[in-house]
Amino acid sequence: MDSYAVFYDIADPKRLRKVASCCEDFGLRIQYSVFLCRLSATEFAKLRSRLYALISLDADQVIFMPLCSRCVNSMESIGRPSPPPDARDVVIVV
């Protein structure tokens, strides 16, 4: 399994809700438009395909940033705590 940071900027509120819901199926919400996803190659393909079908290619953008395990384990945050991960998510050490 590989880890990805998934970021999005969606112009339409209706599409935004659908994109957020889709990302919630695959990972842990870190911020409003940022998810941390731990995915197999098949799951990554499914997520990318579902998002491709939901967005407007002219108005919206989704970025998939691969993260190495060292990067994931070195992540830090300040301020409000991140929500607790479930079994499918990456554990973030703060």
Image: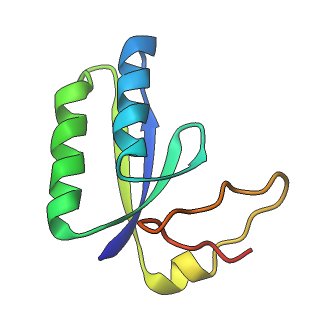
Occupied quadrant, residue 62: top left
Whether residue 24 is situated above or below residue 28 in the rendered picture: above
Residue 71 position, x and y percent, is: 53, 79
| Residue in the image at 35% along x and 25% along y | 18
Whether residue 66 is situated above or below residue 27 in the rendered picture: below
Q: Nearer the viewer, residue 91 or 36?
A: 91
Report the quarter where the C terminus lies: bottom right
Q: Which colour scheme appears in the figure?
A: rainbow
| Residue in the image at 21% along x and 47% along y | 48
| Residue in the image at 24% along x and 26% along y | 54
Residue 5 position, x and y percent, is: 45, 58
Q: Nearer the viewer, residue 59 or 55?
A: 55
Q: Is residue 69 left or right of residue 2?
A: right
Q: Is residue 82 left or right of residue 90?
A: right
Whether residue 65 is situated above or below residue 14 in the rendered picture: below
Residue 75 position, x and y percent, is: 64, 73
Residue 26 position, x and y percent, is: 35, 52
